[in-house]
Each structure stands twice: as structure tokens, then as C-alpha cells.
Amino acid sequence: MLNKLSESIYYLSNQNDKERPTLGLVCGDKYSLVIDAGNSLQHAKDFLQEIESLNVPPVKYLVITHAHWDHFLGMNEFDAVVIVNPLTNQLLQAWRGYSYDDRSLKEYVNSKKMSAQCVEIIKNEIPEREAFQLHSPDIIFEKSLTLDLGNKACVLEQIRSTHTDDSTIVYVPDEKVIFLGDSVYGTTRNSLFHYKKSHLLPMIEDIQKFDAGYFLLGHESICDLDEMNTFWKELKLASEATETTSLEEAIECFTKDNDRSPNENELFFIKAFVNDQILNSQKA
Ligand SMILES: [Zn+2]
């Protein structure tokens, strides 16, 4: 079932056991816009079936928030204009060159081009995958693009992010709703989950520029302004305390700075910022 956020905004909740991220729908008087295509043709079909039962204007646009497989592999199912930023477009090109037969998929897992989970979903939820070829995006926008769905503006913008360098957000000014994709999450390199300290404040600045009351996240569904402000605060405090590759020292510093020990979230973030320091020290 779709969740209704307002007269013109709906979303399909993320489903972690199936690696399915949150999908969004914004409806104007003339057209509708979808945010993210789903992790498979089946995910996209399930979403489209829900949309059909709503009796909303036709889906004219599909925005892909970033080039992670769980956000775009369902895109062929949409008869819509697909919009991405230049880096997402570039990253999707590799996926268009892939073959989806057993032998190729096995090879991609071995060479770490695809995760084992991704291949499992492809095998289960993309029928006739031997002939599957990912479509091309239709519009490549630079920095920012505003669409009018008929008395309903949607602002697309590429922002600085701790998750990927190709993060696009969708902001609906009328409703003060922003779809963030995965942009506020950390990322994994050399099997280390980390938060890029250097990207944190620029990202918060890019997101807070938009006057939003509700925030849709790729793998959490929805946060209100209070929840988001708590999230920012915990991230910032964790980041400020972490100038070292030692977890122990970072926790000690946090405790001294804040006159209390870190809570569970803050501890998780501190570990991720410590991992960032470790990765940076390896680079140097
Ligand atoms: Zn992602």
C-alpha cells in the first residue's frame, strides 16, 4: 500500500528484507513524477500497480536519485522520461554494458561490480534477464532543474553528499517535502563503512537550504523536522569528536566535550568517522 503524505505526495515504504528502497510519487494537475525506479522489474511493477489504483495523472517523469542498483534496476518498467545528473548518467552506462546471464553475473560478483544480494534479486525479480538491457536516461540535468507537473513544482538538485558524489534530491516547495534518496547515509570502501567528515557540513548546508518539514530517506521512509534536526546534531557531534583513528580516543573526546557518553546513534556515527580517518590515513 502507498502511504499518503499529502493531497499530491505518496510513497511506497522501504522493505529491508527485500533490499527495496523508498519510492516516491508527486502528482500535479497534469502529470505525475516518480522518485527512484526500484531494485527490480518486480519492485517497479508492484509500485506501478499501486499508482494505477490511485487515479492520478499519468507518470511522465522518473528521477533516479543515484546510481546504486537498488534505486534504478526497475527503470525499464516505466514508460516515462528518465532524468539523472551527469555523474549518475556516466555510472549507469556501465550497467548498460552488462549481461545478465548466470555466467556474467557470477563474474561481476567475483570482480565486485555487483554484490551477491544484487545478483540474487536480479535472478528472482527480473524475468527473461538474458535479454535484459537497461534503458538510457532521457534528460541529463546540470546542478538544478525545476519541473512543473501542473500547478505543482518539483525542484531537482544535485547536492554534496556523504553517500555518493552523484546524489540528486527532489524538493516539493508547496508541500515542504524533500526526497533525499540515500544522500545522508555513509558509504563503504575496502569493506569499511565510513562517513566522509569533509562532506558532512557541505551536505547539511545543501539540504538545509530547502525549507522542508518532511524528509523521505531511501531506507528509513520518513522523518519530520525534529527527527532530522536530531539526526544532524548527532552526526555533527560525532564528527567534531573524531580527529583520530582511535575509537577509544574519539569516545573519550566526545565524553569530555559533551559531559556525557555518546548514545547508540552517536556511537555508530563515531565508529564511521573513525573509519573515515583510517581510510584517509591509508591514502596519505
Ligand atoms: Zn545508495
Image (tube, rainbow, N blue to C red):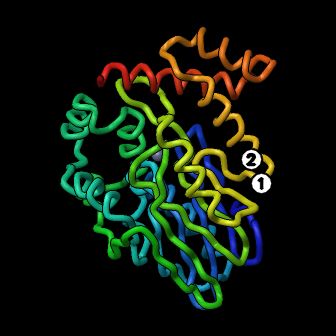
The residues bearing labels 1 and 2 have C-alpha atoms spaced at a distance of 6 Å
Name the element at disc 1.
helix
The label shown at residue 225 is 1
User: Is 101 left, or right, of 276 in this rendering?
Assistant: left
| Image location (x, y in percent) of residue 108 | 24, 36
User: Is 171 left, or right, of 189 in this rendering?
Assistant: right
Name the element at disc 2.
helix
The label shown at residue 169 is none
Residue 132 can be seen, yes or no: no
| Image location (x, y in percent) of residue 261 | 76, 17
C-beta proximity under 8 Å, tags 1 and 2: yes
Which residue is painted at 42% across and 59% down in the image? Answer: 74
Residue 208 can be seen, yes or no: yes
Location of residue 190 with respect to 253 vertically, above or below: below
The label shown at residue 229 is 2
- Residue 126 or 151: which is nearer the viewer? 151
Which quarter shows the N terminus? bottom right
Mark 1 Cα shell of 10 Å, populated few (<14), some (14-19), many (≥20) = few
Location of residue 91 with respect to 109 vertically, above or below: below
Where on the picture, by quarter, is residue 86? bottom left
Location of residue 244 with respect to 189 vertically, above or below: above
Where on the picture, by quarter, is residue 167? bottom left
The residue furthest top is 248
| Image location (x, y in percent) of residue 225 | 77, 54
| Image location (x, y in percent) of residue 176 | 72, 69
